[in-house]
Amino acid sequence: MSVRGIEDMRRSRAVPALILALVLLWCDVAAAQQQISGRVVDRNGSPQARCLVEFFTNANQPAAYRATANNDGYFYVANPRYGSYMVLVRLGQRQQQMNLTIDSTGLHPSTLVVSW
């Protein structure tokens, strides 16, 4: 096989590989945009594990989203809708209510500070 034939063969394989890599990268970006994260900490900045975080659009409706904070206080919500929410953070008998928004850049505020 000639040098030119080898170069043509390499190019013909490189284009599909490049297209596949771009498609996979786009899928990763799209998937990342379908999940938001936040964190629950106490007033001293210590993470609050196992907190239940509930998002409400209306006080008379069930929670639109529910998440539980992990050991580092982080929680995740899949496929959220943009808007304003009343959030209730619960840990045992303790609970705290706060307001936040979700937009194209994520959760605001993304750190939920509880008073206990």
Image (cartoon, grey):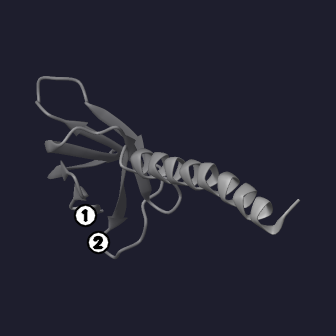
Secondary element under disc 1, as helix, strand or loop, is: loop
State yes or no: discs 2 and 1 in contact (Cβ < 8 Å): yes
Crowd rating for badge 1 (residues with CA inside 10 Å; few <14, some 14–19, many 20+): few
Quarter holding the C terminus?
bottom left
* Along the line of sight, the residue nearer the viewer: 87 or 81: 81
Quarter holding the N terminus?
bottom right
Residue shown at 81% from the left, 68% from the top: 3
Asked whether residue 92 appears in the rendered view, the answer is: no
Q: Quadrant of residue 45?
A: bottom left
Residue shown at 15% from the left, 51% from the top: 101
Q: Vertical placement of 58 versus 80: above or below? A: above
On screen, residue 8 versus residue 46, left or right, reads: right
On screen, residue 77 versus residue 114, left or right, reads: right
* Along the line of sight, the residue nearer the viewer: 20 or 29: 20
Residue shown at 43% from the left, 57% from the top: 74
Residue carrying label 2: 43
Crowd rating for badge 2 (residues with CA inside 10 Å; few <14, some 14–19, many 20+): few
Tell me residue 28's x, y (percent).
49, 50
Residue carrying label 1: 115
Disc nearer the start of the sequence (2/1): 2
Secondary element under disc 2, as helix, strand or loop, is: loop
Q: Which amino acid type is shown beneath numbered disc 1?
A: Ser
**Among all residues in the image, which is located at the extreme right?**
1
* Along the line of sight, the residue nearer the viewer: 83 or 53: 83
Q: Which mark is residue 8?
A: none
Asked whether residue 15 appears in the rendered view, the answer is: yes
Residue shown at 29% from the left, 39% from the top: 80
On screen, residue 67 versus residue 106, left or right, reads: right
Tell me residue 84's x, y (percent).
11, 44
